[in-house]
Amino acid sequence: MNAGGGCNDCHTHPSFAPGGDPFAGETEIINTEQFLAGGRQFGPITSANITPDENGRPAGLTFEEFEHLLRTGREPSGEILQVMPWNVYGKLTHLDLRAIYEYLSAIPSLPDNPNPGP
């Protein structure tokens, strides 16, 4: 999730806490206050909040919906994810996707990011 996946880069805004931006030569400090709560803008698209909902489901998805989304790039509604690199995640094994889902189920649930931006 944090090393090879890059989920934080798109689903946390801003990605780093003040004073913790490694791209500015600072020691990395992840923005835990909005960790994976979405809000990063990609033109007209806003990254989703992938923290657990009130039922403990990441982004409100069952595991079957989550796996389908990561394999096909399609939301349960059928809408295609334009920015999400689902074509990369879709190549992961069933167990890898299950591990990501379980990790996301275990992190704190956060409200949508109140400060979306680029």
Image (tube, rainbow, N blue to C red):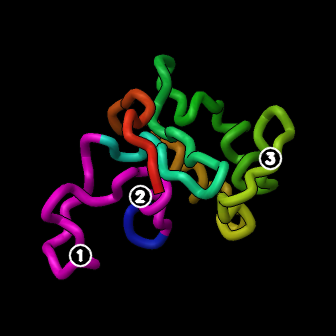
- Going from N to C along the chain, the mark reached first, 1 or 2, is 2
User: Crowding at label 3, few (<14), some or many (≥20) Cα neighbours within 10 Å?
Assistant: some
Vertically, is 77 above or below 79? above
Find residue 31 and report its horizontal and vertical position in percent: 26, 52
The residue segment tinted magenta is 5-33
Question: Helix, strand, or loop for circle 3?
Answer: loop
At 60% from the left and 54% from the top, the residue drawn is: 97
Q: Is residue 21 magenta?
A: yes
Residue 2 quadrant: bottom left
Q: Main secondary structure of the magenta part?
A: loop
Give the camera-side residue of 100 and 76: 76
Looking at the image, residue 116 lies above or below residue 85: above
Instruction: Write down the residue under mark 2.
Output: 8
Quarter of image, res 9: bottom left
Q: In the depicted view, which residue is nearer to us: 16 or 50? A: 16
Single out the residue that lies furthest toward the right. 78
